[in-house]
């Protein structure tokens, strides 16, 4: 049986397929110092016994004996044959680049998909949206067509692609298609699920419905609703590039959760997405599993191209 291990090296993730064995006898071929040296050499590149003997300064017959044991136990295999000096040389390569002994018991059900280098706070924040190594949430974006009481077109729905790429590290796709337009979710009466809401109260009608429940909420007394108010600090923010990242219990189903990434404008929504996906640890630094939580950020254009590329955490 094969399994994959994931490791972090130099800030990048690498995976490797390993062979799991329940019978220790099948890994017997590894339990020898000389055999181990031969195997390490074979993993560098396909090689034939005579060259192994020369490089390790071992008797050729002894090399053939160890090669035979490794081959019998399914640890290496012949991948090519080449004529050398009137004889047929067999080139060997490993059947797998990792081997492990699988003891019975000890299996644990995954609450989330383990990714090296990702904080426990992030895993806690994503639950129950990522559960058992699978996405259990719907990403909801505003419709690009005129909709809602002010007939606004969404211009920030494409930011959900960045969110989806980020979430893909933590779980496999849900059985159902994971993205919906706000108007479809509303029409289908499915606001009682785990939801990721992308976009503010003008572009996403579900965000507008949930707005009264947010600890940092949009002020909707004056169109075009480009201000947010923080209950924690009693401050109001009017900048276009203000974004919020918030997690609350779904008022339509208290066993479900809603995560909102939205802004005063589409620029603010982009700032929220950048903050959540690029500066995760900083954003969640003060998150401790609260049922109602929010962070507030401001987006900046650092390279002068007219597009937001950096953020500052305000709260």
Image (cartoon, rainbow, N blue to C red):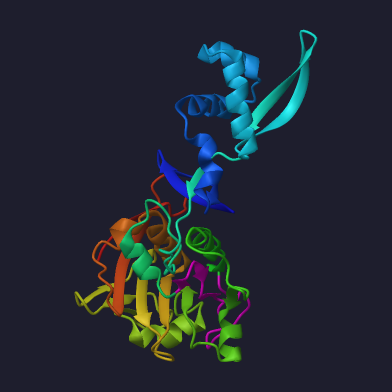
Residue 197 screen position, x and y as percent: 47, 75
Rendered position, 238 above or below 10 = below
Query: Going 50% across and 79% down the picture, which residue do you hit?
Result: 204
Rendered position, 179 above or below 270 = below
Query: Going 30% across and 68% down the picture, which residue do you hit?
Result: 295
Query: Going 47% across and 61% down the picture, which residue do you hit?
Result: 170
Q: Quadrant of residue 84?
A: top right
Query: Going 59% across and 40% down the picture, which residue do you hit?
Result: 96
Q: Nearer the viewer, residue 165 or 100?
A: 100
Residue 244 is at least partly visible in this image: no
Q: Is residue 74 left or right of residue 126?
A: right
Q: Which residues are magenta?
A: 129-154
Q: Nearer the viewer, residue 50 or 13?
A: 50
Residue 129 screen position, x and y as percent: 45, 73
Tell me the quadrant of the picture where the C terminus can be found: bottom left
In the image, residue 200 lies in the stretch drawn in magenta: no
Q: Is residue 35 left or right of residue 89?
A: left
Residue 118 screen position, x and y as percent: 37, 55
Q: Nearer the viewer, residue 143 or 255?
A: 255
In the image, residue 136 lies in the stretch drawn in magenta: yes
């Amino acid at each position: 049986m094969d399994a994959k291990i994931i490791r972090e090296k130099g800030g990048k993730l690498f995976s490797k397929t390993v062979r799991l064995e329940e019978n220790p006898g099948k890994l017997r071929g590894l339990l020898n110092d000389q055999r181990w040296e031969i195997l390490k050499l074979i993993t560098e590149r396909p090689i034939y016994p005579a060259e192994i003997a020369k490089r390790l300064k071992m008797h050729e017959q002894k090399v053939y004996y160890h090669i035979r044991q490794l081959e019998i136990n399914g640890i290496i295999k012949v991948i090519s044959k080449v004529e050398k000096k009137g004889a047929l040389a067999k080139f060997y390569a490993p059947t797998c680049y990792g081997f492990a002994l699988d003891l019975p018991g000890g299996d644990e059900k995954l609450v989330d998909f383990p990714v090296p280098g990702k904080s426990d706070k992030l895993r806690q924040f994503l639950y129950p949206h990522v559960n058992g190594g699978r996405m259990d949430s719907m990403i909801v974006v505003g419709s690009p067509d005129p909709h809602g009481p002010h007939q606004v077109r969404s211009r920030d729905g494409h930011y959900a692609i960045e969110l989806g790429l980020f979430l893909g590290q933590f779980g496999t796709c849900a059985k159902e298609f994971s993205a919906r337009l706000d108007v479809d979710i509303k029409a289908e009466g499915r606001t009682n699920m785990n939801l990721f809401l992308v976009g503010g109260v003008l572009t996403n009608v579900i965000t507008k419905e949930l707005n009264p429940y947010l600890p940092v909420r949009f002020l909707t007394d004056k169109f075009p609703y480009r201000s947010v108010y923080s209950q924690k600090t009693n401050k109001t923010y009017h900048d276009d590039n203000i974004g919020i990242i918030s997690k609350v219990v779904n008022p339509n189903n208290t066993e479900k959760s809603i995560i909102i990434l939205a802004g005063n404008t589409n620029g603010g929504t982009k700032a929220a997405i950048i903050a959540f996906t690029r500066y995760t640890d900083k954003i969640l630094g003060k998150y401790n599993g609260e049922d109602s939580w929010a962070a507030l950020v401001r987006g900046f254009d650092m390279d002068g191209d007219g597009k937001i590329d950096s953020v500052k955490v305000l709260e």
